[in-house]
Amino acid sequence: MRALLVLSFVAAALCAPLAQADNAAPALHRERIEWCDIWFTDAEKDALPRVLLIGDSITRGYFPGVESALDGKAYCGRLTTSRSVCDPVFFQELALVLGQYDFAVIHFNNGLHGWDYTEDEYRAGFQRLVDALREQAPKAKLICALTTPVQPSGGMADSAPRVAARNAIATEICQSAGIPLDDLHTPAAEHADHFSGDGVHFNEDGKKAQVKLVAEAVAAALGE
């Protein structure tokens, strides 16, 4: 009986911090469709450095071009997801990917999902992302991609000022951490002709412009 009481006490003590952490975490907000797309090319090889691109459907759009631009220089993979940095599932996905390889460069973005979370919650989540990358991929050179804009004519027009606010948060955190920025926002904002019809995603010209910026940033980090 005494042993059972001791075990119960220990279990309660161990669970208490978890319960407190859960209480402190923001309430979960789900989108109508949640998705995750993980892709590794040349998964069986190890002769070249490996690069990871983290983002959403925008990243998925420019990934093939970046992979082609870095052909012969690096193996490329991606973690593209609808999960915001405010969602704990994002960090489960991240841990799954980071546990598979040692990455030389990680180019990351998160900012166009999770609109039901506040900017304060986003700040905490983005800081957690930077901390997780530093802890789980300590050898990787990190590059933060600023979130691309949304057009006033698109279905997410109300999110335009929040994109700017989130980019300001990401900039502040990354500059404080010594992480270089890849500004994908400004060039896209200057080229309305680079958007697709939904005002969020990009046509082929827009993707080509992003491929050039991302590939150059990654190649520089690789020491090209």
Image (cartoon, grey):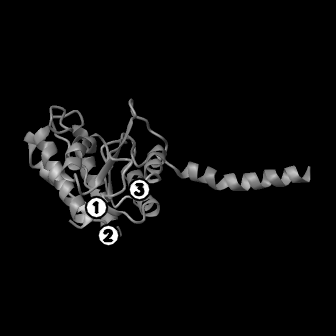
Q: Does dot 2 land on a helix, a strand or a loop?
A: loop
Q: Does dot 3 land on a helix, a strand or a loop?
A: helix
Q: Could you say where residue 6 lies in the image, as x and y percent from the top left?
A: 83, 55
Task: Specify whether 152 is left or right of 132.
Answer: left
Q: Earlier in the sequence, mark 3 or mark 2?
A: 3
The residue type indicated by label 3 comes to Leu
- Measure how far apart labels 2 and 1 are at the Cα level: 10 Å
Task: Specify whether 18 is left or right of 187.
Answer: right
Occupied quadrant, residue 9? bottom right
Q: Which residue is mark 3?
A: 129
Q: Which residue is mark 1?
A: 171
Q: Could you say where residue 197 lies in the image, as x and y percent from the top left?
A: 15, 31
Residue pushed farthest top?
32
Q: Residue at x 63, y 50 (%)?
A: 19
- Measure how far apart labels 3 and 2 are at the Cα level: 15 Å
The residue type indicated by label 2 comes to Gly
Q: Does dot 1 land on a helix, a strand or a loop?
A: helix
Q: Residue at x 7, y 40 (%)?
A: 193
> Is residue 224 shown above or below 29?
below
Residue 148 appears in the picture as rendered: no
Q: Earlier in the sequence, mark 2 or mark 1?
A: 1
Q: Which residue is mark 2?
A: 178
